Amino acid sequence: MGSGGLELPPGDDGGRQGSSTDVPPGAVSLARPMNAGAIGPELDWDAEAWHEVRTRAQRAGRAYIWLNLVEQRLRAVVAAVLRPVYEPVHGDDWVVAAAGPAGQEWVQRAVAVREVSRRKGYLLDPADDNVLSFLTLPQLRELMVQHWPCFEPYLDERRDVELALDELEVTRNVVSRNRALSEAVLSQAERASARLLEVLGAGSDVPSTRRLPVDAVEDLVGDRYADVVAVHSDRVRLLRQFPAEDLFGSARRVDALGIGLNLLVQNFSGRRLLRLAESGGRVRLLFLNPASSAIKRRERELGIKRGELSRAVEMNILHMRRVRARLRDPGAFEIQVFDETPRFTAYLVDGDGADGIAVVQSYLRRTRGMEAPVLVLRNGRNGGKVVKSDQVDEGGLFPTYREEFELMWADSRPVS
């Protein structure tokens, strides 16, 4: 007899003779447990499903980092501007006073959440024990809009701030509800966040950001990867994300080492190189000697016709010689050749300063340079703020390739 007064059916009798399958009147029928093996396949995720959820998590993680940075920065700006106005009169309740009657509902909700967090021990940092820390991004925006005359002396364009926050609102709702975030929306959110942080006076202090912007994820976890800031499977994808104009434009120094230096010669105009050298810059180009035995071995590795690669390199050298011939100071544009087996190609832009960028590719057998993986390095990455105090700065890859270039340059011959 069950607790509710209903009679339960008898258990399985193991198939004994004479057992009845009829359920007596008033008894509750209990479904027999299914075989565990029958449940498993319905719960399994295949490789495609795992790939989908990992992609969602990666995108949401990137978006969360950007949103977190923006929210913390906006909170600091609101506190810096409004606290001196309201705190002398209202004390710890200055946020409630600043919200005013229009924001009474949401600020009281924040106060309540704060009290619950206090009671349950969720406030792990005493610095977060204030109402401002419990305001959301839209609520911080509301405080700024309500008191815009107070912020106007510090922020140039209210429209830029509001447009950026509008673009972020879609991403914030998606991330907070753990919904799918498309690549396009993520890219829009990253651009809006970077623009908003710049407007709020929190731009990156890494010198090379004018050439290669510092990504929020790089800024937080970049120390895990030395000074490697990007990896591309081939040069096509590199140029799609990092065009030659962004790499070489406005450079003051370009040092390049490789077989034919196609990334520079074929993707950056001679006129721009001429302007770079005439404006006080310096260019040093180190090609593989088109008459060397090393270039013949490379032709055999790639399976191309004899002389095809050497002619291509010779044409690149002739093109660079024509650019150099138009300079008043040819010493600012040097061209040399080496005869050793080529091991990698490297483009070092402003490599003598803290704002240097390098693009490096290793030479692979039977793989053309256009198809080889590419590393993008940022000089001084480990010397920046991302290195934690308890870590030893072991240096990055940039100085290694810069030193190798100098050694190769010293052992090479000039082209007249």
Image (cartoon, rainbow, N blue to C red):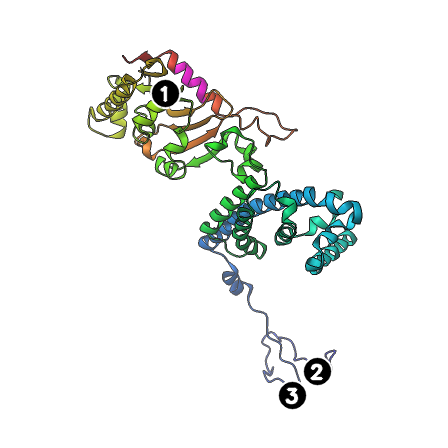
Residue 403 magenta-highlighted: yes
Tell me: 260 left or right of 45: left
- Describe the element under mark 1 as helix, strand or loop: helix
Residue under pointer 1: 277
Predominant SS along the magenta part: helix
Q: Do the residues labelled 3 and 1 touch (CB within 8 Å)?
A: no
Give whichever of discs 2 and 1 has the lower sequence position.
Answer: 2
Q: Are marks 2 and 3 in contact (CB under 8 Å)?
A: no
Give whichever of discs 3 and 1 has the lower sequence position.
Answer: 3
Residue under pointer 2: 6
Give whichever of discs 2 and 3 has the lower sequence position.
Answer: 2
**Residue at the bottom extreme, as displayed:** 25
Spatial CA span between label 2 and label 3: 10 Å
Q: Can residue 150 be seen in this view?
A: yes
Q: Which of 175 and 269 is in front in this view?
A: 269
Spatial CA span between label 3 and label 1: 100 Å
Residue under pointer 3: 25
Tell me: 66 left or right of 279: right
- Kindly identify the residue that appears in the image at 49 percent across and 56 percent down: 45
Q: Which amino acid does label 3 sit on?
A: Pro
Tell me: 308 left or right of 280: left
Q: Residue 39, relative to residue 148: is it above or below?
A: below
